[in-house]
Image (tube, rainbow, N blue to C red):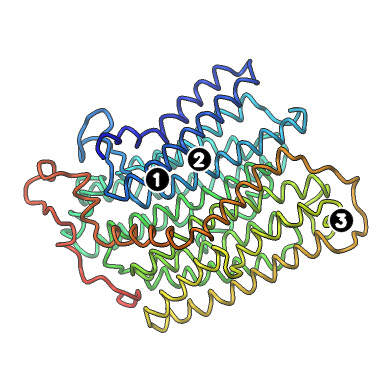
Amino acid sequence: MTDLSWLVPLPVVLPLFAAGLTLALYRKPRLQPIVSVTALSLVLIASVTLLVVVDDGPLVVDVGDWAAPVGINLVADRLSALMLTISSAVTLCVLLYSLAQGRDDDEESAPISIYHPTFLVLAAGVGNAFLSGDLFNIYVGFEILLAASFVLITLGGTRDRIRAGTIYVVVALLSSVLFLVALAAVYAATGTVNLAQLAIRLPEIDPGVRLVLQVLLLLAFAVKAAVFPLSAWLPDSYPTAPAPVTAVFAGLLTKVGVYAIIRTQTLLFPEGRLDDVLMWLALATMVVGILGAVAQDDIKRLLSFTLVSHIGYMIFGIALSSEAGWTAAIYYVAHHITVQTALFLVVGLVERVGGSTSLTRLGGLAKLAPLLAILFFVPAMNLAGIPPLSGFLGKLGLLQAGVAAGTPLAYLLVAGSVITSLLTLYALIKAWNKAFWQTPEERPRPGRLPLGMVGPTAALITVGLVLTFAGGPLYAYTARAAQTLRERTPYVEAVLPDGQRGEGESADATDHDEAAPTGGDDS
């Protein structure tokens, strides 16, 4: 297994190398897509291989041969490998979609020389955030994402995109400042930012200080994950970007924040002192997000609000602080990345065929493009949680975990989850009926449906269906990932072998754990 540790840095190194190469080839735009597609295809292969290999235990690479906790290390375990695999598939499909869109537009509106290196840097930032074994390197991953996403969200230079990009970057910088403050506080309190070493040292410091550190980290990650009330920026920022950019943002960027919450809550703060607070935030995120979606007459904004709403499901699973809750949350993250991205790609096709994303101007698309009606309906029903699709499996797991917790707050979240799911179904059915079946009052000249853009969209919808048909094995994998998160020892021992832990630091991180709650009712 250790012979395959060279695979671990590839999801970061390959996109960065390809980004530099595509930048050097800016005068040869025909070569840039070849480099980009090749790099992301290799990243997908490496990620799938890691997904299989790390099922036997985490793989660790010490960058520059500087062993942890002194040096930077990249850690691939079940959770990070699953996130890498799903994100690699999504980024590859979105890239192929954008290439087809550029060909269909005769590349007049696509600044190709900028797009490829920036998109690859974004992919590298996502990989770095998932693999980072210390808080500072996670911060670096977030900053890579920020730099690349600001360029992508303002592509085209229109007034709306610049305005949305400004809002996005101000909020992201605020989150980065919070994260830096949290990093400084963590280092001052513990003398390290290495996640494995923090898992050992944090239980030894004052509980009040530990709670402050937990709050600071949660605030920083909650902004990036768009958790209510720190989510108002998202519906105003995402819809203005080009369809491929909106899709990859919706699918991945918020999930990097959710991943950071999962990693820190389970590894660093397993006692769950803020679980009740997280559950209230999860409920507010669900309800406020879906009420916003119901009120929208633009499909992009509607989907942006559903994106916010369904972050609440993931936070609900995390806040339960049980293996069942974490299992369902991890599965739901994987499901949501694929389905939400696919829906935004479909909306890009809707805009191309119907000339608008406004539900008051669309109509009759089922007759113009019946294939498009199917492409929208399948992921829409998946997002709404219709049986037996993956959205239903994830929500059912969350509901079962909530009922098993047995607390009044958990039951309230169960009820909120059901109501949110029904309202999601209502909002998406309303959008489907208006866009595809109503008779439009007026419509711009209808466009055509480019097959080159349909292919990647259909592929991503198929990935979502694979999560359904392979729901049993995948759910078992996420259960094993949740078990590893609960134990913590495999992660700590993989990063810090006996000779590197330092004097007085236990080999078993769980020796320091306080009694772990099962329902988040101990705060």
Q: Are marks 3 and 2 in contact (CB under 8 Å)?
A: no
**Residue 349: % across, % down:** 74, 47
Q: Earlier in the sequence, mark 1 or mark 3?
A: 1
The alpha-carbon separation of the residues under discs 1 and 2 comes to: 15 Å
The label number, if any, that marks residue 121 in the structure image: none
Q: Label 3 sits on what residue type?
A: Lys
Which structural element holds mark 2? helix
Q: Quadrant of residue 73?
A: top left
Which structural element holds mark 3? helix
Total marks shown come to: 3
The alpha-carbon separation of the residues under discs 1 and 3 comes to: 43 Å
Q: Label 1 sits on what residue type?
A: Phe
Q: Label 2 sits on what residue type?
A: Leu
| Mark 3 surroundings: few (<14), some (14-19) or many (≥20) residues within 10 A | few
| Mark 2 surroundings: few (<14), some (14-19) or many (≥20) residues within 10 A | many
The label number, if any, that marks residue 367 in the structure image: 3
The label number, if any, that marks residue 146 in the structure image: 2
